[in-house]
Image (spheres, rainbow, N blue to C red):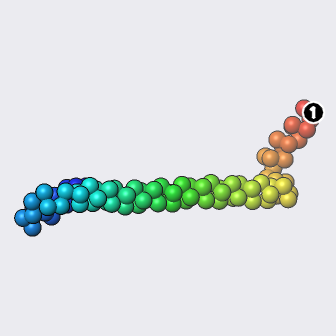
Amino acid sequence: MGFILRATTNRSMRKPFTNTPWKYVTSSLGLGSIFHFVDWTRRVNLETNCINEEIMDHQKQKIFLDTIAVGEEFNDEKLVEELAVKAHRL
């Protein structure tokens, strides 16, 4: 990308390639480094977001299980019947 940008800039300014041959290499490496850093930052942010989402899901599930452990399961008759059947089998 940097090579193409430098080549079109020099062509529009009517500068020959022989005047600045190292600028093609440095601009290519510079733009490549910038694109690499932007892509790496985007991936790290996406991974962090996914990890935080998994943590939130785990916390929601833990809160739900804690509410069941307190005694709200006795409000549901089907659950009480299932527990009675399981207890009877033991």
The quadrant of the picture occupied by the C terminus is top right
Q: Residue 68 falls in which quadrant of the image?
A: bottom right
Q: Residue at x 37, y 61 (%)?
A: 34
Total labels drawn: 1
- Looking at this rendering, what residue extends furthest in the bottom direction? 13
4 left or right, relative to 69: left
Which one is nearer the viewer's eye here, 80 or 4? 4
Write the residue at 29% across / 59% down. 26
Q: Where does the image place residue 72, in percent across and percent down from the top left?
A: 82, 58
Where is residue 84? Give x, y as percent: 88, 41
* Residue with the most extreme front position: 19
Quarter of the picture containing the N terminus is bottom left
Disc 1: which residue: 90
Closer to us: 1 or 75? 1
Report the front residue among 69 and 14.
Answer: 14
For residue 71, say whether it is visible: yes
Question: Residue 37, located in which quarter of the rendered image?
Answer: bottom left
